[in-house]
Amino acid sequence: QAIRPHAGAWQGRRVLVTAGPTFEDVDPVRFIGNRSSGKMGFAVAQAAAEQGAEVVLVAGPVVLATPPGVRRVDVRSAAQMREAVMANLDGVDTFIAAAAVADYRPMQASAQKIKKGEGPLQLALERTDDILAQVAAHPRRPARVIGFAAETERLDEYATRKLRDKNLDAVAANDVSAAGLGFESEDNALALFTPDGRSDIGPASKAEVARILLQRIHALGTTAA
Ligand code: CTP
Ligand code: CA
């Protein structure tokens, strides 16, 4: 009997995932970044591929192995991540934005290393584009658009606001102030917000959390009220 390595619930579906931080250059030796290991997004990409999806993973600067069967596109800045996402949007069924994208970048990266002076240094920052919001508003919007939300307070309020304001199908929210979870941790716990309400996932390994998250995303819009 033939072995079918990719039989699963996501067979034949295209899934686009963003993961990791973005780095916004200040000068040739410095950048503005954020605390994201990329592990949660990579776990989501791996779980989707294991379930038979055709997965493209747009990854910021992380030190992680590419999950088997996943096509990986490496980027550094928010602008590059946006470019890579838009270039791979065609035919995507589900977009999952797990990346911690910089909200601001230096208005102008200095061509030379900035030398230190006596007083404080002022850096002018400008907003980056919201990749998730742009995908959700795109003429070729995927059927399912899922965001993440890292919050240190008022999790329900902020996550449901992101769900509504960005026109998403679900928001997977992380309480990043919880001890031992999120960021560099191997474990995670998520609160999944959909128009139907909140359901919790974990705490469990990021691999297990990713599998449950994908099950819930797969079931979106198919459950009877
Ligand atoms: N996101 C994105 N592009 C950005 C900023 C955020 O695609 N420029 C996505 C993230 O990948 C995540 C979601 O938007 O899926 C929410 O990110 P988060 O930082 O929690 O929310 P923001 O909308 O940026 O709001 P704030 O940082 O003010 O809480
Ligand atoms: Ca943000």
Image (cartoon, rainbow, N blue to C red):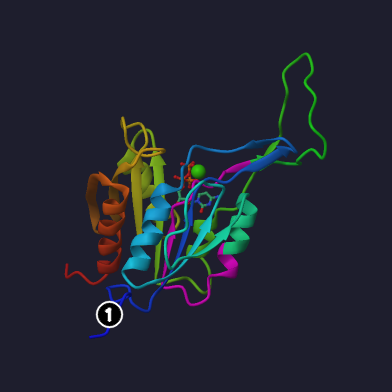
Residue at far top of view: 118
**Quadrant of the rendered image containing residue 73:** bottom right
- Percent across and percent down for residue 21 are 53, 45
Left or right? Give the position of 18 relative to 211. right
Work out whether residue 164 or residue 84 is closer to the camera in this orientation and state it. Answer: 84
Residue at far right of view: 112
Quarter occupied by the N terminus: bottom left
Residue at the (71%, 37%) spot, across then down:
26
Instruction: Mark yes or no: residue 195 visible.
Output: no
Q: Is residue 14 above or below residue 131?
A: below
Q: Is residue 131 above or below residue 204?
A: below
Work out whether residue 173 or residue 178 is closer to the camera in this orientation and state it. Answer: 178
Residue at far bottom of view: 1
Q: Secondary structure at mark 1?
A: loop
Quarter occupied by the C terminus: bottom left
Left or right? Give the position of 195 relative to 146. left
Mark 1 lies on residue: 3
Q: Name the residue type under label 1.
A: Ile
Residue at the (62%, 50%) spot, across then down:
76
Residue at far left of view: 224
Residue at the (64%, 54%) spot, across then down:
79
**Quadrant of the rendered image containing residue 184:** top left
- Percent across and percent down for residue 49 are 37, 67
The magenta stretch spans which residues?
85-104
**Quadrant of the rendered image containing residue 119:** top right
Secondary structure of the magenta portion, mostly?
A: loop
Residue at the (19%, 69%) spot, across then down:
223
